[in-house]
Amino acid sequence: MKKNTGIIVGIVAAVAIIAGWFISTRNSFVTVEENTNGAWADVQTAYQRRADLVPQLIETVKGASNYEQGTFIAVTEARSKAIEMNLNGEDITPENVAKFQQIQDNLKTELTKAINVTVERYPELTATGAYKDLMVQLEGTENRISVERKKFNDAVMAYNKKIRMFPASMVANMCGFEKKGFFEASAGAEVAPTVSFE
């Protein structure tokens, strides 16, 4: 009788240890996934800040000069597309992150064109305080975006590493935790931009 009781106690203890490990491992996955989702929300906040500054850029330039209609339309359309694409934590796949990044890169490109047109065609505008302040805000926003993207990539790396490490990867597979996508450098980012004042 004592022998059977010892075996039962041993089995119950082993099951309790395995169940405790499973629960602890799953909860740690939830933690790193939520850290990743939080980092993604910070990235979106930084991009939203940029999108909110675009109308200010347009109004600043329009207020000081006759702004080119084509540039205005291109920036407005790029901003609209950037605002429309939102991803939540479950949608952070490599493909969706790449699509989000492409849309944001298009907005940045249009903003850069708009600023260059402004500086080239309306040099007196660069001397105004409002324009200078806006440029500082845009530069700060781009820096924030860069910082938040790095934090996001760090969170994704920690998450992806955790769900792939054995034996925890078995729990990740059983509970449906999937790999998240990274932000990657834009095509052509390795080539330095050419500055021209022609």
Image: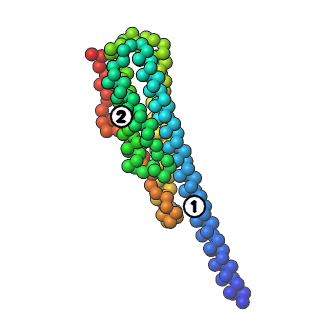
Secondary structure at numbered mark 1? helix
Label placed on residue 151: none
The extreme left residue here reads 198
User: Is residue 123 shown to the viewer in this render?
Assistant: yes
Work out whether residue 122 or residue 71 is closer to the camera in this orientation and state it: 71
Work out whether residue 164 or residue 48 is closer to the camera in this orientation and state it: 48
The CA span between labels 1 and 2 is 40 Å
Residue under circle 2?
106
In x, y percent, where is residue 46? Answer: 49, 34
User: Is residue 166 shown to the viewer in this render?
Assistant: no
Q: For the point 42% across and 22% down, which residue is it?
A: 58
Relative to 160, does residue 114 appear above or below in the rendering?
above
Q: In this view, does 13 lie to the left or right of 88?
A: right
In x, y percent, where is residue 89? Answer: 50, 49
Q: For the point 33% across and 22% down, which residue is it?
A: 69
Secondary structure at numbered mark 2? helix
Residue under circle 1?
25
Relative to 35, does residue 137 appear above or below in the rendering?
above
Disc nearer the start of the sequence (1/2): 1
Q: Is residue 71 left or right of residue 8?
A: left
Relative to 140, does residue 99 appear above or below in the rendering?
below
